[in-house]
Image (cartoon, rainbow, N blue to C red):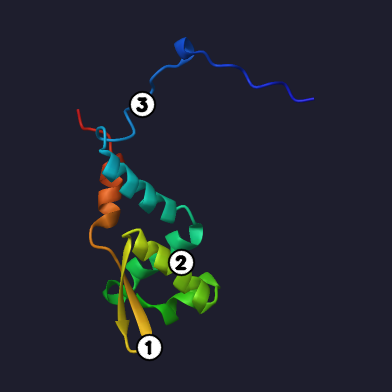
Amino acid sequence: MASPLPVIQPADLVVCCSPVTGGVVADETAELLARMFKALGDPTRVKLLSLIAASAGGEACICDLTEPVGLSQPTVSHHMRLLVEAGLATREQRGRWAYYRVAPDVLRSLASALAPVAG
């Protein structure tokens, strides 16, 4: 039988690192960040963003994204729709194909939202 987890009392907690964010974020900003991080919570979407960022010219056609992730075009389109809705990517229709780019400076903004305040 597994032993129960120890109960940690507030007095036992020690602050060992800097705060998670650079400061308190406004409710609207917190909601936006949560939407973005939720979209990045799927490994396929993380891989799709990295494929786009690494593509020549910083853009990729949906037709070039299916094989590297091993998924059908409709499934990749679904993932890309979620990334676009979260503000992480942009979409441009060219004829019958959709082309995607990583939204400008969005990944840097996400990283800076979680960076500790320099002291």
Task: In the rendered view, tell whether residue 84 sits above or below residue 6.
Answer: below
Whether residue 67 is visible, yes or no, is no
Distance from disc 1 to disc 3, alpha carbons, whole Å, reads 50 Å
- Which residue type does callout 3 highlight? Cys
Taking the spot 27% from the left edge, 63% from the top edge, the residue there is 103
Q: Secondary structure at mark 1?
A: loop
Distance from disc 2 to disc 1, alpha carbons, whole Å, reads 18 Å
Give the image location of residue 94, x and y in percent: 31, 85
Q: Secondary structure at mark 2?
A: helix
Residue identified by numbered label 3: 17
Give the image location of residue 101, x and y in percent: 30, 70
Identify the mark at residue 79; answer none if there is no mark: 2
Taking the spot 31% from the left edge, 40% from the top edge, the residue there is 114
Whether residue 92 is visible, yes or no, is yes
- Which residue type does callout 1 highlight? Arg
Q: Of the residues under marks 2 and 3, which one precedes in the sequence?
A: 3
Question: In the visual, does 74 lie left or right of 29?
Answer: right
